[in-house]
Image (cartoon, rainbow, N blue to C red):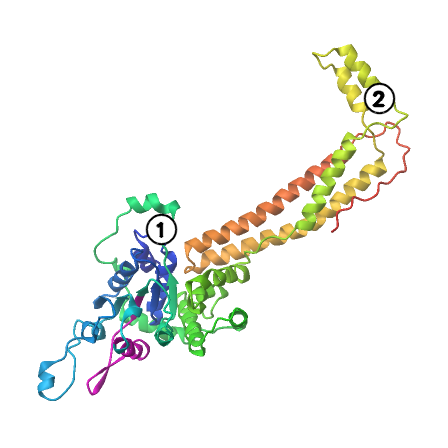
Amino acid sequence: MRWTAAIDELERGLLQRDVAARALLLAALAGEHVLLLGPPGTAKSELARRLQRLLPGAHYFERLLTRFSVPEELFGPLSLKALEDDRYERLTAGYLPSAEVAFLDEVFKANSAILNTLLGLLHERCFDNGQHRVDVPLVCLVGASNEVPQDESLHAFYDRFLLRVPVAPVDDAHFAALLQTALPEGEAHPDAQLSSASLQALRAQAQAVRLGDEVIALLSSARERAKDTQQTVSDRRWRQTAALLQVQAASRDASEVSTWDTWLLPFTLAADPDQVPGWTDWFLLTVAKATPLSIDGLERAATAFEQQLDVERRAPADAQDDSAGKLALARAIAGPSSESELVRIASERAHRRYGALHIRARVAQVAEVQQRLDGVRAEVHATAGVVLAQARAHGWLPPSWMARIEAVHAQRCAQVDALAARLTELHEGFAALPRLAEDTSEFVPTPVSWQA
């Protein structure tokens, strides 16, 4: 994929930031904004700075907002020369209205005067400077916050961030690597850089990408889930989400959006970080087919047959057979310290022997379960092959998600393979039951009961 170098540049030296890096880059490609939700020290500003380095010549603006922040800090000081001419204008050079990439930390702590101006700037890419409305070159604004705003007056501003990505501290498994990994410095590699022309061409290409019936059906299912879980998603957000999926598909040179492109839905539909895992699981179940394997009935059958085989192997000889007495006599002759061939032969004869009809019936019963499992097993392995091939070919799917998908399908395949091995042992075990020397038995055993 042609954007691989840019992804690598965003992730280089950072741990467990594959989701945030991909979401950030896709937002920039689509001209959308990203909100990174997490505690301080989780590389939120670092990701924003790296995005700026991917855009040659792009201006970068960064501020930490507080309730005491004033508009001059973001939009520039008033022009004294303009005031002399009775004009209220700001000197925006070097401030947010002149930046292609911006990072606003603690973005929801700003006062209403700043937030109201930001609303128009984010949505319309315009800034009212005095009597003039001027276009701003903003490609992507990255906001950061420790928490979702609870004040209803902030919900409109919160909704302007199409992608809202939780960022957590590095986990214990990666702690040692965190201590030994240095952050790279310097400019981005030329192969990773994104020109303005390439962004415009990609967005134009995305307009011709089809959503397709399968993706529309999946989005409809997502909408039903949102309703069922009482999560409100605005019409504007659905349209923006669809456009973002089209950009992602276009970046893969695809003519139609794939269901795999919807891995972004948890970050566009969830209104709260606590809702993201539920949407992630929904994607893994519906698209990646990463569902727990339900073969309880077949496993109960294997367990029932194992118990029956153990009973039949241990069953004593018929009452008219004196093999048990012969076994006792053989052990007495051999003595306590040795096991003679005579003891082994007598031991085998001390257990019940079975007719051919009995053995064939048991083997046939096991074979029936094996046949049912063979169909399930073939489907499980085929599904794993198709799903993993599609996932690996997608390009944008985060490696951490890929690892989860691989693990689930590996577990599903291992589960059916292990059950197949158990049934093979049962098949061989019943076939090897001791046989009658003179087979005159017409007894057919009652089938093993295992259905529940």
Question: Which residue corresponds to mark 1?
Answer: 170
Residue 85 in the image: above or below residue 193: below
The residue mark sitting in front, 2 or 1, is 1
The x and y percentages for residue 331 are 77, 14
Q: Quadrant of residue 166?
A: bottom left
Q: Earlier in the sequence, mark 2 or mark 1?
A: 1
Q: Quadrant of residue 346?
A: top right
In the image, taking residue 267 as reference, residue 290 lies left or right, namely right
In the image, taking residue 234 as reference, residue 48 lies left or right, namely left
Q: Which of 27 and 214 lies nearest the eye of the viewer?
A: 27
Q: Which residue corresponds to the image point at 41% horizontal and 74% vertical from the top-left?
A: 240
Question: Which residue corresponds to mark 2?
Answer: 323
| Mark carried by residue 151 | none
Q: Secondary structure at mark 2?
A: helix
Mark 1 neighbour class, 10 Å CA radius: few under 14, some 14 to 19, many 20 or more: some
The x and y percentages for residue 35 are 34, 66
Magenta stretch containing residue 88, yes or no?
A: no
Q: Quadrant of residue 6?
A: bottom left
Does residue 414 show up? Answer: yes
Q: Which residue corresponds to the image point at 15% horizontal and 77% vertical from the top-left?
A: 91
Could you tell me the amino acid type at mark 1? Answer: Val
- Mark 2 and mark 1: Cα distance apart in space: 69 Å
